[in-house]
Image (cartoon, grey):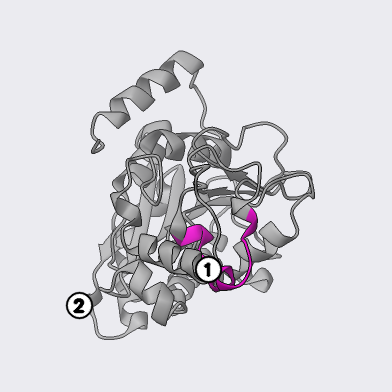
Amino acid sequence: VYIGLNAAERIEQRVDLAMAELLRTGAFERRVLVVITPTGTGWVDPGAIDSLEYLHRGEVASVAVQYSYLPSWLTLLTRPEHGAETARALFRAVHAHWRSLPPATRPKLYLHGLSLGALSAEAALDAWDLLADPIDGALWSGPPFRARTWRSLVSAREPESTAWLPRFRDGTVVRFANQWQPAGTEGWGPVRIVYLQYASDPVTFFDPAMAWREPEWMQNPRGRDVSPALRWFPMVTMLQVAADIAAAEEAPIGHGHAYAFADYLEAWRAVSAPEGWDTDALVALKAEGARGERP
């Protein structure tokens, strides 16, 4: 279900349209339901949703409501809070109906957001809404540097872990993953949250403070796709990375801000624990999914 910005004048009206369509199509009768917060332009990454649908053999319903036409990078630098209001209204409407259903038969409920969508999806979560009946998990990819929850988790990481692949506490609730290090399927608690992020993603690792101090992600050991030739210079590096933000999606798939089907697949596998997949089947699915991606 996708509700465009022009479908109705107010946020509440667009959310009502989304809920009506979810109910009409029997979305709450599926095995999995995912609430998506799109990017600033209203885009939903096909690889992020295709991978989840393959893993659960089509027993997936998804819903997104558009909130802007602006590119995410432009919104990040000007109005980073844009989209949170829509994300919060949609989540609360879906969550309220989901809570009213019998726990034994209702779908697993997940959140997803890419880029600005990840920031807005974070803001949609209110701890008080979740204490009585928590969601099953979330996948946030390419979280922007302004995402508060992401920043707090990175700051509170285990000391021996890196800024570009943090480890938060015992990993039972939140894990970080990249293209070489999946989140894994063992040792989780009842709620699973994965941040999928590439060390070479400037949308995630830009920081205005780079103007006067070297960022932690540039320190050794570096991510495998961050050039060892990159050096920090006051002000210069900050401007370089800021310029990279506008072109981050033009990187080869699996680097920068271009997230790969295979990495989404591993992330959703960790978050949603699908049944009936062995190693050979997953390898074949990754290969098939990669065929549809640009080089």
Which quadrant: the C terminus? top left
Q: Is residue 89 above or below residue 204?
A: below
> Which one is in front, 276 or 295?
295
Identify the element where label 1 is drawn. helix
Which residue in the structure is indicated by mark 2?
6
Residue at the spot x=53%, y=37% of the render?
224
Magenta span covers which residues? 203-216
Q: What's the distance in space between the residues labelled 1 and 2, CA to CA?
A: 25 Å
Q: Is residue 60 visible?
A: yes
Number of numbered tags placed on the structure image: 2
- Amino acid type of the residue tagged 2 in the rendering: Asn
> Which one is in front, 101 or 34?
34
Q: Specify whether 293 is left or right of 227.
A: left
Neighbour tally class for label 1: few under 14, some 14-19, many 20 plus, Cα within 10 Å: few
Residue 259 is situated, as x and y percent measured from the top left of the image, at: 39, 45
Which residue in the structure is indicated by mark 1?
96
Q: Nearer the viewer, mark 1 or mark 2?
A: 2
Which quadrant: the N terminus? bottom left
> Which one is in front, 169 or 279?
169
Q: Are circles 1 and 2 on residues that touch, CB within 8 Å?
A: no
Residue at the spot x=57%, y=37% of the render?
270
Residue at the spot x=30%, y=75% of the render?
68
Identify the element where label 2 is drawn. helix
Q: Is residue 54 above or below residue 118?
A: above
The residue sitting at the top extreme is 280
Q: Is residue 285 above or below residue 180?
A: above
Q: Earlier in the sequence, mark 1 or mark 2?
A: 2
- Amino acid type of the residue tagged 1 in the rendering: Ala
Q: Specify whether 178 is left or right of 26.
A: right
